[in-house]
Amino acid sequence: MQTDTQFSSAAMKRTSDWIRSQEFPSDITIQVGESSFNLHKLPLASKCGYIRKLVSGANGSRVTHLEITGMPGDAKAFDLVIKFCYGVNFEITADNVAMLRCAAEHLEMTEECKPGNLIGRTEAYLEEVALASLEGAVTALRRAEELLPASDKVQLIGRCIDAIATMTCGDGSHEGLDDVGAPRKPVDDWWADELTALRIDTFQRVMIAMKARGFKGIAMGTMIMLYAQKSLRRLDMNGRERKKMEPRQEHEKRVVLETIVSLLPREKNTMSVSFLSMLLRAAIYLDTSLACRLDLETRMAAQLGQAVLDDLLIPSSSPEGAGTAYDVDAVQRILAGYLENEGEATRLDYNTDDDFASAASPPNDVGPVGKLMESYLAEISSDVNLPVDKFTGLAELIPERARFNEDGMYRAIDIYLKAHPSLGEGERKKVCGVMDCQKLSREACAHAAQNDRLPVQTVVQVLYHEQRRLRVPPPSQAPSGAPSYAGGESPAVSYGRERSAPSSEVSRLQRENDELRMELMQMKMRLRDPSGAAPAPAPPLAAGATRSFPSSGKPPLPKKQGGSGGGGGGGFMKKLGRLNPFVRDPLGGGKVRTKPPKDRRHSIS
């Protein structure tokens, strides 16, 4: 016998040594991959139909060398086949049964060749042992996946998947998992770790089979999260500069991500918003299909009330310097989807059987969502590449019922104006137009009154509403016939009602407010253009005439009732100091009339 045979393992060497120890010399050399075996034709041909065909017939006796190609499991599997053909005892286990079954199919080791052949032996082991336990089925599936497409030819992958799905879900242990509030059986770590190591196409088949048998909700979401964390953990999605990736590797990651998104449970609250945000960042980074990204945005919109600021800071796909640092359009679509869902829930009385509905979610979280969006606006306002239209478009999308006060919006506006000092007067007015001055707190009003970045018209509105809040008594103490300004009426409506009120006290307060507004406007104009003359006041309205407002829909500044110019400056500042706790009196040596608030941390300048 030949002694120069190559062996790929110690087991193969022992097998060959045993063969050489027999009385009869070998009459055939079989090459499998890089390994060669000196064997005998008779024991092989008696059990392997494939080898029998090649060594039988008139020319069969002349065949002394044979090469077997496409052998599932390569030389390792053929070594076990040789032992079986020569009657050497070895153990069939869940770890090698898939390899033996595929090798026996390839070599045609059927019952027609010899009863009790290797195909029948491996099938019996699969049915009685391997696929009878969850651990055996998972192990066999892992090994069968390595033998594709041979394992699919014998339907081994499908049978392992069916066994796993039946044992994990068929006993009812996962019933009710689609109900978020139901008790849940935790996913076992050992088989979850095994399944999340599968290829994405095999993992998809497992998840679909388990879902068909009732494996849903949190349990399925946990499996998908584990798989995503393993397969996407090396992606650097936080920096603007992308690390170069091989095209093939990028394509594989893209396929994995799109498949994961397609497997996500449709039930609400089964996946955290942070995980959905991570998937969306990866989808933008890998340039997945538009449908994949929109699906993730829809899911985030359904759970926006649970999000935090970091979940919305999604890096933009545009290169550095060519666009905004964060994907503002995606966040705007998410907010629009949230508002649409909220409107539908209000109209349809919130059906908990819907795909994205859940009894575990709060019935109305519009308030926290409003605060979250104001924080997001403040975060992105410092981006010098953020255009006015994107800022105002997102700000205007925040509903009024979600904005209990305007301090957060004012903070975002002030940061934006500070980061964009080259804005014109019209653009600054447009930015400030998204803020309702009536809802500013006293501290915010004090800061806005001294903020040189704000347009004059906005400062005047802030002072007007602050004076009205200070001087008009609350409804419980208001004199008979005095109008109430609770509910956020516009200045124009309030002005008309106050003029028609019979109370002399309200009329006097209104006249003082008119004087203050006109004096402040004139002083602002003189400070900005010292050489220019103060604008002449408009002629008084005739009796019965109506006042027309400009196209902006905001009321014009009222006329000064007394003298013009600087003749009444001292009286004006005394009144202003008396009525405003945050205005200094130039006649009093620059001292503050009243003690300023101790907490000045609201200032943004």
Image: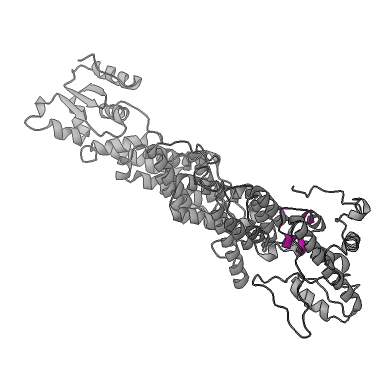
| In this rendering, position of residue 133 left or right of residue 407 | left
Q: Above or below — where is 112 with respect to 207?
A: above
The percent coordinates of residue 272 (x first, y second) are 59, 50
Q: Name the residue rendered at 29%, 44% in the picture.
A: 153
Q: Name the residue rendered at 35%, 41% in the picture.
A: 124
Residue at the bottom extreme of this rendering: 544
Q: Name the residue rendered at 48%, 40% in the picture.
A: 231
| In this rendering, position of residue 65 left or right of residue 499 | left
| In this rendering, position of residue 546 left or right of residue 102 | right
Q: Magenta span has 458?
A: yes
The percent coordinates of residue 318 (x first, y second) are 49, 46
Residue at the top extreme of this rendering: 3
Give the quadrant of residue 4.
top left
Q: How is the image coloured?
A: one colour
Q: Which residues are magenta?
A: 447-460
Nearer to the camera, 468 or 174: 468
The percent coordinates of residue 415 (x first, y second) are 68, 50
Q: Above or below — where is 23 with respect to 533?
A: above
Nearer to the camera, 22 or 276: 276
Nearer to the camera, 54 or 503: 503
Image quarter hosting the N terminus? top left
The percent coordinates of residue 35 (x first, y second) are 26, 23
Q: Above or below — where is 426 with respect to 94?
A: below
